[in-house]
Structure formats: structure tokens, C-alpha cells
Image (tube, rainbow, N blue to C red):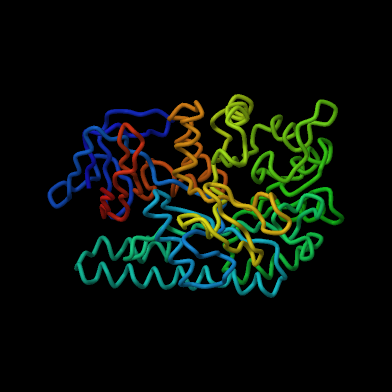
């Protein structure tokens, strides 16, 4: 496939009026492009950006990852895809180990089913290159039903601090347990990409020392001060879960996790730019303080995302959606995830004054890099999956392209 006449988001974080080439679902150089049997897409008037990567999302359209349903995960993946998110990490809540094991086991089952569907679809099309792509992806290829790729799990809890539990159930919070982590990672086929930890809790620092390097450790739902956060980053933590939310504020005598992260050049910080969790001025401050290479926009979406106002659940707890705001029913006014998808959060960041290039980087390249998948998703470097979005000048999502298939939205 050749996408021509558009403004393509490059690996340098800028837009360029160049063609984009793909073969077998992967980005290729022009010399490797077989134009004798390939489709051309005229992207005149469009930005061409990589498919978004959401590393923190609990659910959407009436389904929660913690429902532990393969079909529910499929519905979430289909919604994400049509919303411009082509890769995501379903995110768990604080629950007992037995329940988490059941939930995590849905990911390999989902990947197996989508790989089978992709193979059957390309067999029916009699396309050897597409079949090879589907088999090579080992389930990461989008399904025949246009679903986003599940690229790993974000394990948010239960290794948190009850003092900063937010919408997490404090009754199920436990000290970080390496053996428990390994059992859960085995249940999902080794697909945990991020684990959120409160470093100040008993045994949690020892856990960070042991797992850092094998999994991305994120500090969050924590009352840790600056010194403890610095210790955790020195031990290998490299990520912060929804900056500002469920942590101590930046204070001039103890800057806490926020200040400690600012001083670490290799630490990524998640940011929910839905206009509910973080004030627009604070969003601008984060990009000024951390730069656009370390900010990871996330949705933190819940099953209420894409649904009408009303009562829903999050990790088994009742929540109320009113407009773009989601709160626990009891106690009330505690923000419980979001009702926005990542594409909406990216557009909100632009409306807050963040340059388009910076917002796109924070929703594509940065999250991919934060989970060690920058060579596979979130960019147009040769060899990466050629997932891309066609976006008009008003930032309206017009088309999603993946696996050499174009889905026009309107």
C-alpha cells in the first residue's frame, strides 16, 4: 500500500509531505514496496499519524477488562480501533489474586482467537503475504472484525497504598509479592508490561529491585515522598501512573513523586488530559516540565466510555457517569477513571494549547517506547506495524488503516 499526498508524522516528531509505504502490514522503504499489485490511498488534506497506543485503559462500551470475558475484551478492542487506538494495554484493578488470574487468562485466549480469525480472513482472500503477516503476529494482528491489538497488560494494583487508593478497593491491597506477580504473569503468558507499585509500603521496594528490568515498574496510588520516589527510580522504576492523581501534590518542601520524576530523564509520566482529572494549565505545565518526549497520554477509560450517562461499574465498584466525569457512587465525588478515549484526550490536549506534534508524540511514540515496543507500534519506522490514522485539519478522525485494510469512518 502507498499513502500519498498527506502530511506524515515522522520519527523526528514532525509532519512531512512524503509518501508512506507498507507491505504485508508493515512499514517498508520505497525500495521494498511492490507497487505492481498494491493499493494507493490519496491522503490529500489529511494528517497521517500512527495508530494511537493506550497503555492505561480499563474498558469501554459497557465492558470492563476486569469482567474477565474474552468477548468483552473483544468489544473493547473493536471500540478502541474505531476510535483510533490500534494498540492498547487492558488495565486491571485491585482484586484478589484468584480473580486477577482469571482476568489475565483472557488475554492469551483473546489473542489466540483473533489470530485464528485473521488467518481465516486472509485465507479466504487467498493472500499469502497477509497470511504470513497474521501468523507472524502470533495474535497481535488485528482481527477480522477490526480490533485493536492487545500489546500487554497494565497491572494497576494490588501493590498500592490504601491512603491513596482512589477508586481502587482498599480491602484487596496487599504488600508487593514477587511470587504472586510471577503466577499472574504466567496466567497471561508473560504479557504484563507495566505494574503499578506504591514504593513506601512494606516489602514494595524489595519487589521493585527484583522485577525492574523484567517489567516496567510504575509509581502510583502512593503517598511516597521525594526521597522514597528517588530511591524507587534508582532501583529501576521508570514510569508514573496518572501523574497528579492518587499521589501527594508537588510541595516546595517535599516535591514527592512528581518532583522526583522530573529529575529522571528516563522516566515516563502518564497524563489524563480529559479536562476532568487535570486542569488545562497543569497539562501545559507537565509538557513544559517534562518535555514532549516523556509525557504519555492515557485515557484511563472505564466501561462507561462510549455509553450514555448512568450507573456503571469499575472493578466491581459502582460508578456514576455524568458527561465526561465518572465518580464512585460511594463515597461520592471520588473520580473513578474516565469516560473519554485516548483520541479524545489527545484532541483535548491540543485544545489546551499543546502543539499537535507534541500531543501526537505523547499518544503514539512515547507510550510505545514506555513499554519497550517502539520498534513495533506507535511510529512509522521500517518494520513497525503500518497502523495509521487519516485525520483532517479539524482533527476529525476520518479513517483507520491496519493490515492493509482501510476503514473509512465518514
Q: Nearer the viewer, residue 256 or 180?
A: 256
Image position of 33 with respect to 67: above or below: above
The picture quadrant where one finds residue 14 is top left
Residue furthest out toward the left: 36
Image position of 378 with respect to 329: above or below: above
The picture quadrant where one finds residue 126 is bottom left
Give percent across and percent down for residue 111.
45, 68
Identified at 22% across, 48% down, the residue is: 1
Image position of 354 with respect to 334: above or below: above
Identified at 78% across, 56% down, the residue is: 207
Drawn side of residue 73 relative to residue 193, left or right: left
Q: Nearer the viewer, residue 380 or 323?
A: 323
Count of numbered labels shown in the rendering = 0
Give percent across and percent down for residue 192.
60, 60
Identified at 26% across, 55% down, the residue is: 405
Give percent across and percent down for residue 104.
59, 69
Drawn side of residue 345 relative to residue 281, left or right: left
Q: Nearer the viewer, residue 301 or 293?
A: 301
Give percent across and percent down for residue 232.
77, 44
Amino acid at each position: 500500500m502507498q499513502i500519498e499526498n498527506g502530511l506524515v508524522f515522522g520519527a523526528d516528531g514532525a509532519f512531512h509531505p512524503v509518501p508512506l509505504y507498507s507491505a504485508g502490514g508493515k512499514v517498508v522503504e520505497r525500495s521494498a514496496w511492490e507497487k505492481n499489485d498494491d493499493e494507493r490511498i490519496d491522503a490529500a488534506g489529511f494528517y497521517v499519524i500512527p495508530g494511537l497506543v493506550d497503555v492505561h485503559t480499563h474498558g469501554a462500551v459497557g465492558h470492563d477488562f476486569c469482567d474477565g470475558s474474552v468477548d468483552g475484551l473483544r468489544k473493547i478492542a473493536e471500540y478502541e480501533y474505531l476510535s483510533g487506538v490500534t494498540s492498547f494495554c487492558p488495565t486491571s484493578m485491585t482484586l484478589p489474586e484468584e480473580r486477577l488470574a482469571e482476568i489475565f487468562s483472557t488475554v492469551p485466549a483473546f489473542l489466540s482467537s483473533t489470530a485464528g480469525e485473521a488467518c481465516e480472513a486472509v485465507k479466504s482472500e487467498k493472500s499469502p503475504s497477509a497470511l504470513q503477516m497474521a501468523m507472524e503476529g502470533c495474535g497481535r494482528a488485528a482481527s477480522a472484525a477490526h480490533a485493536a491489538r492487545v500489546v500487554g497488560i497494565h497491572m494497576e494494583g494490588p501493590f498500592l497504598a490504601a491512603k491513596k487508593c482512589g477508586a481502587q478497593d482498599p480491602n484487596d491491597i496487599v504488600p508487593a509479592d514477587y511470587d504472586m506477580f510471577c503466577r499472574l504473569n504466567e496466567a497471561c503468558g508473560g504479557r504484563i508490561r507495566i505494574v503499578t507499585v506504591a514504593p513506601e509500603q512494606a516489602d514494595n521496594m524489595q519487589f521493585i529491585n527484583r522485577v525492574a528490568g523484567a517489567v516496567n515498574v510504575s509509581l502510583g496510588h502512593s503517598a511516597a515522598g521525594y526521597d522514597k520516589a528517588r530511591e524507587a527510580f534508582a532501583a529501576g522504576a521508570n514510569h508514573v501512573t496518572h501523574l497528579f492523581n492518587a499521589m501527594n501534590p508537588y510541595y516546595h518542601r517535599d516535591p514527592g513523586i512528581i518532583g522526583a520524576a522530573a529529575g529522571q530523564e528516563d522516566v515516563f509520566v502518564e497524563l489524563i488530559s480529559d479536562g476532568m482529572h487535570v486542569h488545562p494549565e497543569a497539562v501545559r505545565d507537565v509538557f513544559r516540565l517534562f518535555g514532549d518526549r516523556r509525557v504519555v497520554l492515557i485515557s484511563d477509560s472505564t466501561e462507561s466510555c462510549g455509553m450514555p450517562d448512568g450507573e456503571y461499574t469499575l472493578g466491581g465498584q459502582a460508578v456514576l457517569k455524568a458527561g465526561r466525569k465518572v465518580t464512585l457512587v460511594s463515597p461520592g465525588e471520588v473520580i473513578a477513571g474516565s469516560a473519554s478515549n485516548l483520541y479524545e484526550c489527545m484532541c483535548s490536549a491540543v485544545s489546551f494549547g499543546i502543539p499537535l506534534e507534541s500531543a501526537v508524540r505523547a499518544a503514539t511514540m512515547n507510550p510505545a517506547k514506555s513499554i519497550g515496543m517502539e520498534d513495533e507500534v506507535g511510529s512509522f519506522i521500517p518494520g513497525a506495524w503500518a497502523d495509521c490514522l487519516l485525520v483532517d485539519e479539524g482533527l476529525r478522525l476520518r479513517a483507520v488503516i491496519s493490515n492493509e485494510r482501510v476503514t473509512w469512518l465518514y
